[in-house]
Amino acid sequence: MSDMITADLVDLDLSADTKEAAARSLAERMVAQGRVTDLDGFLADVAAREAQMPTGLDGGIGIPHCRSAHVTEPTLAFGRSAAGIDFGAPDGPADLIFLIAAPAGADDAHLTILSSLARQLMNADFTAALRSVPDAEGAAALIRGDEAPRVAGGTGAVSAAPASDDSAPASDDAALVSDDSASASHDSAVAPGAASAGATAGSTTPAPAPTAAPTAAPADSAPAGPFRIVAVTSCPTGIAHTYMAAESLENAGREAGVEITVEPQGSAGFTRLDPAVIAAADAVIFAHDVPVREKDRFAGKPTVDVGVKAGINRPAELIAEVRAKAARGEVTAPAAAGQGAGAGTPVERTGDATEGYGTKLRKWLMSGVSYMVPFVAAGGLLIALGFAIGGYKINKAPSVMDHFLWTQADSWGALLFQIGGVAFGFLVPVLAGYIAYGMADRPGLVPGFVGGAISLTINAGFLGGLAAGLIAGGVVMAIQRVRIPAALRGIMPVVVIPLISSAIVGFLMFVVIGKPIASAQKAMTDWLNGLTGTNAVLLGALLGLMMCFDLGGPVNKVAYTFATAGIAVSDPGDSAMKIMAAVMAAGMVPPLAMALATTVRGKLFTPTERENGKAAWVLGASFISEGAIPFAAADPLRVIPSSMVGGAITGALSMTFGATLRAPHGGIFVVPLIGNPLLYLVAIAAGVCATTALVVVLKGLRKPAPGATPTETADGGTTPTAPEPEEQPVAA
């Protein structure tokens, strides 16, 4: 810890009035110490993390933090603001600001220390000492653990005590890491809610709650033995909120007289709770903003499922709520079906309990798309190969069950075409089934698949599949809210829910909404088939922009799904095949452009980026847009807009040239299956060159990043030596 924060990284008179200005002021200190190589790039990563969820905490604390390729070593910077700065905490501005910077590939030991600091922030004596410490050196010593906070003379004043002082034993660098030092240092001197500063990343230490006095429990009647709770905490970065929530729950558990064991699922990995501990638990608390890993371990128990900030700000309420659920006998169904609208499932529950419906809807839809894509790729390639081998009349061939000659190419073409057609037949049911799965977990699969199959039967296509999946998930979630007698709970997910939900979804699809959706699907198909001239070119440009906007993310998937929906029929129209060609061409541009840029102007990139550039050649050629993600993560403000320009050019040119494609994937390996293949390659090359030129120009205009050219001498002596940046992985 001693090298993670020094007096030079402390500002006790932070004058910033916004969180952005505060982050910049502290980050500039990191740059001056050679801890950050690109100020703007690092601040962009901080802002991206802040956009996911505010980092302000109750008690006047702000903890902006991120993992970034622009960080050379794990670093802390601390600022104290007299006026306070708004970091989005419910109780008002923060006066203690911690900027936590972790490299993209930080090792477990360093992340453990950062996470232990997060636990320390839950200690009231620790924060009080930071508010009163008079000098930067003392503040740095407190944060490092060289000095421990001490209550002075019972007056409430807090001062920093040397680690060797008898009043604060076992407090040294290990105070932020070792379980033993943590448990030995505070119990006799601080309030029962003081932090246990020493839990390591992934630790699962039960709170040392007294078990001798059930009368010490809250006013509500306590069970004969100690009430046992297991909890899981996690946040998108896995550095701060994860461990602060764990500490807060443990403190509240001690105060409530319950035994609580927490599994923090952080960046440094996690240690799974002993199955015996889970089995003995009376209830479960999930405080998370990313999916709980191996959530099924906790099925069948009273459960409270909230965002991670609720675990920090109101742990006592969560404990009281889960105890009340246990008293009422409310338990989750197998696979943790959850409570309430939009409650947690392994694929949908990735955000705060207050997350908007639009965000949840996007996640549900992306759940279905992600499971559908492999069927699209396999089926589409098989169909395309069938046409390549057997000719474009192969779709008229009889079934290979009736006619197959081993030595005839047409028979093999027909075989591939018919296998691909069967695979394509699963697209809509899989889409609908896994949308419902994203909403309601496994109970949603049956009505979702049934609704998707009905959509095919009534020619409602993909639009019908989307509607069927959402309806199926909503019906199952509604059924799960109904209070069921304990004797029937065992058959609910196996018999009752599939039966009732399938009947309701089938009725709605066949009788109520099926025909209008089928008409809308036909209208969309006719519109696509009628696209010509300028309209087609503009559509190609729009799809190109979407493919390059988030490189495999939701917007990219929307464009890809739109394209595959058009060719997912036995005889796709010419316009549908043009759209598919434009989408694949645009998706190849970003990784190929990054590969070319690292080749022609390698000095603008770090050694790791140049290595990633070599792999990007293959990824781009294979139509794997995610090959550009390391570059976009390291420098989004230059890479993403440049990629979008190149993608729009390629999409528009592909539509202009009339290139067609029957296969939904494959990159350059399916060029023989493309209509107008030479002009198609010209369109790709034009977009790649445009993106490369823009990236090179934009990177050349910025201030040189000290770590970008490790073979050159660092300026001003503030940058680490050349070999250090070579070891920095790039965040994917």
Image (spheres, rainbow, N blue to C red):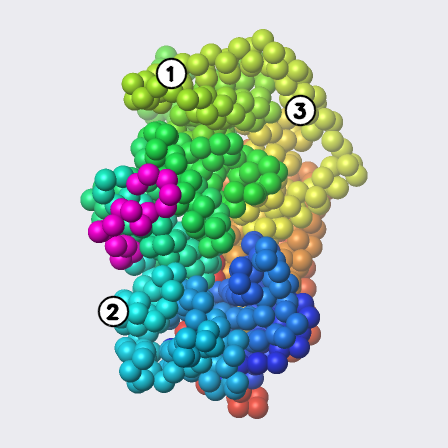
Point out the frontmost of discs 3 and 1. Answer: 1
Q: Which mark is residue 496?
A: 1
Q: Earlier in the sequence, mark 2 or mark 3?
A: 2
- Amino acid at dot 1: Val
| Pick the front one: 630 or 380 | 630
Mark 2 → mark 3, Cα distance in angstroms: 67 Å
Is residue 454 left or right of 701 when viewed as pictured? left
Mark 3 → mark 1, Cα distance in angstroms: 38 Å
* Residue at the image point whose x is 69% and y is 29% from the top: 528
Q: Residue 211, image x and y in percent?
A: 23, 51
* The residue positioned farthest toward the right in the image shown: 534
In the depicted structure, whether residue 436 falls above or below residue 93: above
Q: Which residues are magenta?
A: 204-222
Mark 1 → mark 2, Cα distance in angstroms: 51 Å
Is residue 682 left or right of 707 when viewed as pictured? right
Q: Secondary structure at mark 1?
A: helix
Q: 10 Å neighbourhood of mark 2: few (<14), some, or many (≥20)?
A: some
Q: Residue 251, image x and y in percent?
A: 37, 57
Residue corresponding to mark 3: 525
Q: Earlier in the sequence, mark 3 or mark 1?
A: 1
Point out the frontmost of discs 1 and 2. Answer: 2
Find out whether residue 727 is within the magenta segment.
no
Q: Residue 11, image x and y in percent?
A: 57, 81
